[in-house]
Image (spheres, rainbow, N blue to C red):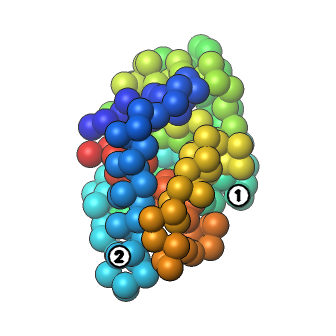
Amino acid sequence: MNSLIAHRFLVGEALHETERQEILRLARRLRAEALAGRPGTPLAGRHVAVVAAKADSPAVQIFDEAACWLGAHVSRIDGLAIDTGRTRAALARLMGSLYDAVDCVDASDGSALALEQLCDMPTFLGLGGEWHPIRQLLPALNDATPAHAASEHADLISLIQAVLVESIR
């Protein structure tokens, strides 16, 4: 499991160039497989959670879509649950035993980082959010294969999928 990529995003560190290239390579491969009608399910049997106050937010929807297309089971958890200090440790232990990764869509940076430290699993902070640094990779995704350019939504799905696969492996 390479939860270091998830951690770099969580604490605002830049990806190393080799990590960046691996994410882009994997995103291109996943996108090509989907476009060819033979998408893989590398996360089949895996369980991920998305923590958010609003289940219908675009960030929740895109994370859910990306994870489900990879074969993962996605659970939704109320965003207020992880911000309650009294129950955070117990919830983190439970989540660590149930899930392979978690995306904290509208949690505070501190809450998401505390959750990562308590449950020792890849933890993201709004991976599908409009402000997430993963979006900085969108232009580079089509640099090598502009003929395969898809919509920004599809490209973002591919990048999120690549990050999930790299983080959960």
The x and y percentages for residue 119 are 40, 25
The x and y percentages for residue 133 are 61, 41
- Tell me the kind of residue under disc 1: Pro
Q: Residue furthest top?
A: 86
Q: Of 157 and 67, which appears nearest the observer?
A: 157
Task: Specify whether residue 157 is in view.
Answer: no
Residue drawn at x 31%, y 67% is 41
Image height check: is 74 above or below 39? above
Q: Of 21 and 51, which appears nearest the observer?
A: 21
Q: Return the mark for residue 33.
A: 2
Q: Which residue is identified by label 1? A: 58
Residue drawn at x 49%, y 77% is 148
In the picture, measured across the screen, residue 12 lies left or right of residue 117, that is right
Q: Label 1 near label 2: C-beta < 8 Å?
A: no
Task: For the C terminus, give its image quadrant.
Answer: top left
Image height check: is 53 above or below 140? above
The x and y percentages for residue 123 are 47, 34
Between discs 2 and 1, the one toward the N terminus: 2
Q: Residue furthest bottom?
A: 37
- Tell me the kind of residue under disc 2: Glu
Secondary structure beneath label 1: helix
Q: Quadrant of residue 162?
A: bottom left
